[in-house]
Image (tube, rainbow, N blue to C red):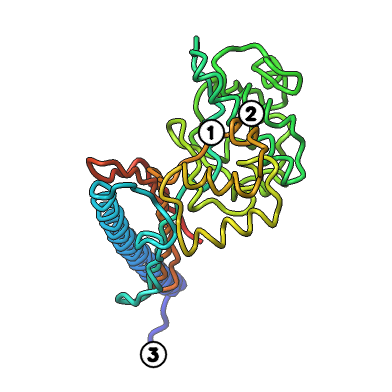
Amino acid sequence: MLNRSPRKRSQSGVALITAIMIVAVASIAAVTMTETLQLSIRRTSNILITDQTYFYALGSEEWARGQLIRDAKRDIKAKNPYDALDEDWAKPLPITAIEGGTVAAQIVDLQARFNLNNLYLAEEPDQKSKDRTAQHSEVFRRLLNILELEEGLAQAVSDWLDQDIDAQFPDGAEDNEYLGGALPYRTANGLMSSPTELLLIKGITPEIFEKLEPHVTTLPETVTININTADTIIFRALVESLTDSDVETLISERKESPFTDNKAFEDRLTELLGDNKEPLKNADNTYSVSSNYFLLETSISMDNTNQYLRCLLNKTDKGVYTLSRTTGTF
């Protein structure tokens, strides 16, 4: 009987260990490759779902544009064009089944809210511009008062918007104050691009912003408030001296018969306010019966993915244009 030498036994042991290591490494590599492949498949699937939901969202944008284009065509033909909540554009797209999920959309009149950029006053303004901005400032001041917020915030917002670098109001602030903070930054000295910009302004806390946000917007030009779509709070801010009962009456009446022009609104206010003409004089530049700016809000749920799309739409007599899009998940 032959005995293996210690050297041969050692070599056999090394070979066995090497073989085991190779198998182990190969197994680890196989598992890693499988996990990587599965991750890649999931990632690709998520990308495809996200892309698919986005294209469905763009489809809702076309729906909204179609609604507003038809409304614009009716306005052109109408003797007294107006926009009101009984029109087709104001009816939401109900939750609709799509392949693998649902989609819902709604068009919101942004001129039912107070446009913060109405407080912006260009350099060397004429008297008409000054008077108009002063009236809008009063509306905003009353809005703050109704929401039980400090009226001085109106001055801080005005200073944020104006083009100079010197505080123009006792409660205002300019670069020298904002640059002295822990995270220094400058004032906009121009139009706001989003209501969230309010959070950068002196005195506005997240709690204050939460109160203001449903009632304000930031549009690229000075606009009027649509008295056919404004809610109770904006209505009260719009015309001084209106009681809660007056506002409820006006909103109830417009459901049945929207205001077709400013005169119809003013005649009704005269009936409510009597001989007190002052509130009308102080607000005549701030309201109208039609709108040009709308917000499309779309939500899509698909394969456990929830995505939203918000579009700023501008309705003109030449067409409806998308000015901005915001997307995200919820």
Mark 3 vs mark 2: in front: 2
Q: Tell me, for residue 74, which label it has, or none.
A: none
Circle 2: residue type = Val
Question: Mark 3 sits on what residue?
Answer: 1
Which numbered disc flags the more N-terminal residue, 1 or 2?
2
How many residues crowd around disc 1 within 10 Å: few (fewer than 14), some, or many (20 or more)? some
Q: Please tell me which residue is depicted at 65% across the width and 11% down the height of the picture.
A: 166
Q: Nearer the viewer, residue 221 or 264?
A: 264
Q: Quadrant of residue 90?
A: bottom left
Q: Please tell me which residue is depicted at 64% across the width and 17% down the height of the picture.
A: 175
* Circle 1 SS class: loop
Q: Position of residue 249 (x, y in %)?
A: 61, 59
Question: Mark 1 sits on what residue?
Answer: 284
Q: Is residue 130 above or below residue 23?
A: above
Q: Is residue 200 above or below residue 225?
A: above
Q: Please tell me which residue is depicted at 59% across the width and 22% down the height of the picture.
A: 187
Question: Mark 2 sits on what residue?
Answer: 157
How far is mark 1 from mark 2, CA to CA?
A: 22 Å
Q: Is residue 325 above or below residue 330?
A: above
* Circle 3 SS class: loop
Mark 1 vs mark 2: in front: 1
Circle 1: residue type = Asp
In the displayed structure, does residue 15 sit left or right of residue 74?
A: right
How far is mark 3 from mark 1, CA to CA?
A: 118 Å
Which numbered disc flags the more N-terminal residue, 3 or 1?
3
How far is mark 3 from mark 2, CA to CA?
A: 102 Å
User: Which residue, as the protein is rendered here, is positioned at the far bottom?
Assistant: 1
Disc 3 + disc 2, Cβ < 8 Å: no
